[in-house]
C-alpha cells in the first residue's frame, strides 16, 4: 500500500479504497440502530483530489444501496406499476386490479397506491406525493380508516391522476393513515414520506431533483407546510383549495423551492383566500429583494369557491427542477408537528436548537461561506451546532475556505475531503444529490 502521512491524516490511494471496501459494505449492511459511530479511519482518511472524491462518492452510494437491499428496503415499497398507457393497451379482462399497499410508522398504517403515467424521462421518474382532501371528523371512529369522506377523496385522487394530472411521472397516492387525526403533516406521516422518497430513489429509478408534493384542501395545507419546513428536498409544490398562516409555512423557506397555490377567490371559510393572499404578497416581496430565488405563482380562480380547477397547479409544478447545491440558503428552523428538520441542502444542524424558531442565512461567494443566525426577535442565535457540508461543485477545496458569521471571520483554512463526510451525508439524506465530500463543524 502506497500512502503518505501529512498533518496526521492518511492520503487516500486506490489501494486504501480497496482495503476499506469490505468494511464499508459491512457497515451499511447493519441496521441503522446497530451501526454506531463511523470508524475513526473513515473520519481521518483524506481524499487528495476532487477526482478521488467523485470515485469515492460513487463507491459509498453503491455500498448504501447494496446495504439497503440486504436490509429489505426494496420490498418495503410497492413494485413499479405498469403505466396507465400499458394498462389501457390490455384487453379489459386482462387489466390488473388496483390493490393498495401499506406503509407504517409510529403505530399508524397508511394505505397507498403507486401509479405511473407516460414515459420515464432520461434522468429518471419524477415522484409526486398527491394528498387527498377530507381530513378528520369530530366523530370517534372505531377504525382509523372508517370515515367514508376520506375514502371517497382518496379515490378522487386516482381519478385526477388518470384524467387531469400530468404524465411522465410516478405518483404516490396515499389514504389518510388515521381519520381520528385527520392530518397529513403529523410526525408519522413525515416518517412515511421519508421512507417512500428514499426507497423510490434507490429502487424505483426516481430522479431526486424532481420530487414534488401537491394536495387538495386538507392535503393542500400540507402542500404548504411540508416543503416550507423541509427546504432543500422538494423541487416544487402545488397547493390547491388551501392556505396556511405565514407562521406555519415560513415563506422565506421557499427560496429554492418553486411554489404555487390555486384557490377560489370566494373561498372565505377559515379565511383561506385571505391567508393565501398574505403569504403570496410576502413571496412577491421576497422575490423582488432576491430575484434569483422565490419562484412562485398565485392563481385565485375567478368566481370559484372551495371547488376549483385542479389542472393548472400540478402541470406548473412538474416543470421545475431542484438545484441540490444552491449558492444561497434561507432557513427558518422550527417544528412541524413535533419534528424539527435538521438539514437544508449543504447546511446541517447536529441537534435541534434550544430556542425555536431560528433563522439561518448562508451564501457562498467564491471560497467564502457567509453565515448569519438570528432568533425570532432578531438577536444573534447562540449555542447552535452547525455543520457546513461542501464539495468541489460548491467551491474549490484545493484552496483555503473562509467562513464568516455576521461579517466576522470564524474559520480560514483547508477543509479536507474525507470518507467520513461522504458516508455521513449519504446516511443523512438518502439522496445522491445531497452527498458531500467535506464538512466543517461549527459552534
Image: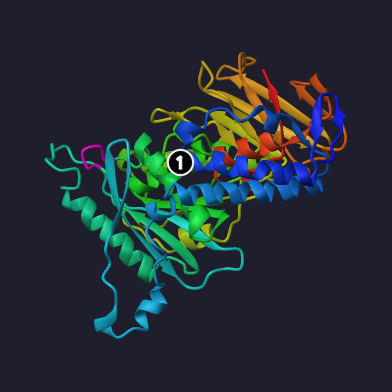
The N terminus appears in which quarter of the rendering? top right
Query: Which of these two is toward me, 375 or 20?
Result: 20
The image shows residue 88 at horizontal and vertical percentages of 35, 80
- Residue positioned 56% across, 51% down in the render: 235
Question: From the viewer's perspective, is residue 201 above or below residue 443?
Answer: below
Left or right of residue 5, residue 83 in this image: left
Residue at the disc numbered 1: 226
Q: Quadrant of the C terminus?
A: top right
Q: Position of residue 72 (x, y in %)?
A: 42, 50
Q: Is residue 193 above or below residue 354?
A: below
Indicate yes or no whether the magenta region holds residue 28: no
Near-viewer residue (216 or 204): 204
Residue drawn at 60 percent across, 55 percent down: 321
Element marked by disc 1: helix
Tell me where residue 442 sits by quadrant.
top right
- Of residues 333 and 295, the one nearer the viewer is 333
Span shown in magenta: 178-182
Q: Is residue 168 left or right of residue 115?
A: right
Q: Is residue 393 visible?
A: no
Amino acid at each position: 500500500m502506497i500512502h503518505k502521512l501529512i498533518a496526521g491524516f492518511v492520503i487516500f490511494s486506490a489501494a486504501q479504497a480497496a482495503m476499506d471496501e469490505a468494511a464499508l459494505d459491512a457497515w451499511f449492511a447493519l441496521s441503522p440502530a446497530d451501526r454506531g459511530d463511523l470508524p475513526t479511519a473513515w473520519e481521518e482518511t483524506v481524499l487528495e483530489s476532487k477526482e478521488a472524491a467523485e470515485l469515492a462518492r460513487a463507491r459509498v452510494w453503491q455500498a448504501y444501496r447494496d446495504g439497503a437491499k440486504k436490509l429489505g428496503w426494496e420490498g418495503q415499497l410497492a413494485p413499479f406499476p405498469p403505466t396507465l398507457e400499458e394498462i389501457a393497451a390490455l384487453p379489459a379482462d386482462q387489466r390488473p386490479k388496483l390493490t393498495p399497499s401499506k406503509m407504517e410508522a409510529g403505530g399508524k398504517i397508511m394505505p397507498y397506491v403507486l401509479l405511473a403515467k407516460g414515459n420515464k424521462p432520461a434522468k429518471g421518474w419524477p415522484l409526486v406525493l398527491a394528498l387527498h382532501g377530507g381530513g378528520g371528523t369530530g366523530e370517534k371512529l372505531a377504525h382509523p380508516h372508517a370515515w367514508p369522506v376520506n375514502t371517497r377523496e382518496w379515490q378522487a385522487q386516482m381519478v385526477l391522476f388518470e384524467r387531469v394530472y400530468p404524465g411522465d411521472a410516478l405518483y404516490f397516492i396515499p389514504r389518510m393513515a388515521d381519520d381520528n387525526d385527520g392530518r397529513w403533516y403529523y410526525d408519522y406521516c413525515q416518517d412515511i414520506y421519508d421512507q417512500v422518497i428514499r426507497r423510490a430513489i434507490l429502487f424505483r429509478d426516481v430522479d431526486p431533483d424532481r420530487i414534488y408534493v401537491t394536495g387538495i384542501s386538507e392535503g393542500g395545507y400540507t402542500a404548504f407546510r411540508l416543503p416550507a419546513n423541509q427546504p432543500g428536498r422538494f423541487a416544487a409544490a402545488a397547493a390547491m383549495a388551501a392556505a396556511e398562516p405565514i407562521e406555519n409555512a415560513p415563506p422565506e423557506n421557499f427560496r429554492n423551492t418553486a411554489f404555487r397555490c390555486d384557490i377560489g377567490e370566494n373561498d372565505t371559510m377559515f379565511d383561506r383566500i385571505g391567508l393565501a393572499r398574505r403569504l403570496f404578497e410576502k413571496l412577491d416581496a421576497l422575490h423582488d429583494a432576491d430575484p434569483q430565488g422565490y419562484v412562485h405563482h398565485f392563481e385565485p380562480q375567478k368566481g370559484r369557491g372551495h371547488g376549483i380547477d385542479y389542472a393548472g397547479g400540478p402541470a406548473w409544478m412538474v416543470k421545475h427542477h431542484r438545484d441540490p447545491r444552491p449558492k444561497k440558503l434561507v432557513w427558518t428552523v422550527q417544528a412541524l408537528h413535533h419534528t424539527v428538520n435538521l438539514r437544508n441542502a449543504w447546511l446541517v444542524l447536529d441537534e435541534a436548537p434550544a430556542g425555536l424558531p431560528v433563522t439561518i442565512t448562508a451564501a457562498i461567494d467564491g471560497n467564502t461561506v457567509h453565515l448569519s443566525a438570528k432568533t425570532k426577535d432578531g438577536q444573534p442565535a447562540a449555542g447552535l451546532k452547525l455543520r457546513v457540508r461542501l464539495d468541489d461543485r460548491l467551491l474549490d477545496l484545493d484552496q483555503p475556505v473562509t467562513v464568516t458569521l455576521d461579517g466576522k471571520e470564524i474559520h480560514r483554512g483547508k477543509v479536507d475531503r474525507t470518507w467520513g463526510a461522504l458516508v455521513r451525508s449519504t446516511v443523512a439524506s438518502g439522496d445522491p444529490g445531497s452527498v458531500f465530500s467535506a464538512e466543517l463543524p461549527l459552534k
